[in-house]
Image (tube, rainbow, N blue to C red):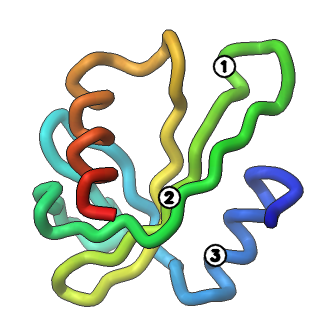
Amino acid sequence: MYKDLADATESLKEEGYTHTFELGEDSVICKNLDKSYAPDEIKVRTSHKFDAGTDPGSEATIHSIETTDGEKGILITSYGMYINKKKSALIDRLLKTK
């Protein structure tokens, strides 16, 4: 298990999850690759939740993901009251592929 988000990020990069993905409105985007992926083009391999204390802004989940074209990377999402509804729905769709 990872001690914190930074440790998880480093370990996953060492395991080959080298790209950084982010949530769009209805897709997952990798700016490095200049590509966006629909939820059905992504497989969530692992998810690890971190809560660094009493500040709701410090809550995050790191997901290791793989795309249908073989790219691997990480997606870090916040959770709780700070996430918008569209992105929350997108996360739910992604987690159904796990």
Q: Position of residue 56 (x, y in %)?
A: 68, 15
Q: What residue do we see at 52% from left, 79% from top?
A: 18
- Residue 77: numbered disc: none
Residue type beneath disc 1: Gly
Whether residues under marks 1 and 2 lie with C-beta atoms below 8 angstroms apart, the answer is no
Residue 50 relative to residue 46: left or right: right
Q: Is residue 22 above or below residue 52?
A: below
Q: Earlier in the sequence, mark 1 or mark 2?
A: 1
The foreground one among 51 and 20 is 51
Q: In what quadrant of the picture does the C terminus appear?
A: bottom left
Q: Quadrant of residue 12?
A: bottom right
Residue type beneath disc 2: His
Q: What residue do we see at 11% from left, 57% from top?
A: 38
Q: Position of residue 33 (x, y in %)?
A: 28, 73
Residue type beneath disc 3: Leu
Report crowding for label 2: few under 14, some 14 to 19, many 20 or more residues within 10 A (C-alpha).
Answer: many
Q: Using the numbered discs, state the Cα–Cα distance from disc 1 to disc 3 in whole angstroms.
A: 23 Å
Q: Position of residue 40 (x, y in %)?
A: 12, 63
Helix, strand or loop at label 2? It is strand
Q: Which residue is the site of mark 3?
A: 12
Report crowding for label 3: few under 14, some 14 to 19, many 20 or more residues within 10 A (C-alpha).
Answer: some
Q: In what quadrant of the picture does the N terminus appear?
A: bottom right
Q: What residue do we see at 65% from left, 44% from top?
A: 49
Q: Using the numbered discs, state the Cα–Cα distance from disc 2 to disc 3 in whole angstroms.
A: 9 Å
Q: Closer to us: mark 1 or mark 2?
A: 2
Report crowding for label 1: few under 14, some 14 to 19, many 20 or more residues within 10 A (C-alpha).
Answer: some
Q: Which residue is the site of mark 2?
A: 63
- Residue 57: numbered disc: 1
The foreground one among 41 and 34 is 41
Q: Position of residue 25 (x, y in %)?
A: 18, 34
Q: Earlier in the sequence, mark 1 or mark 3?
A: 3
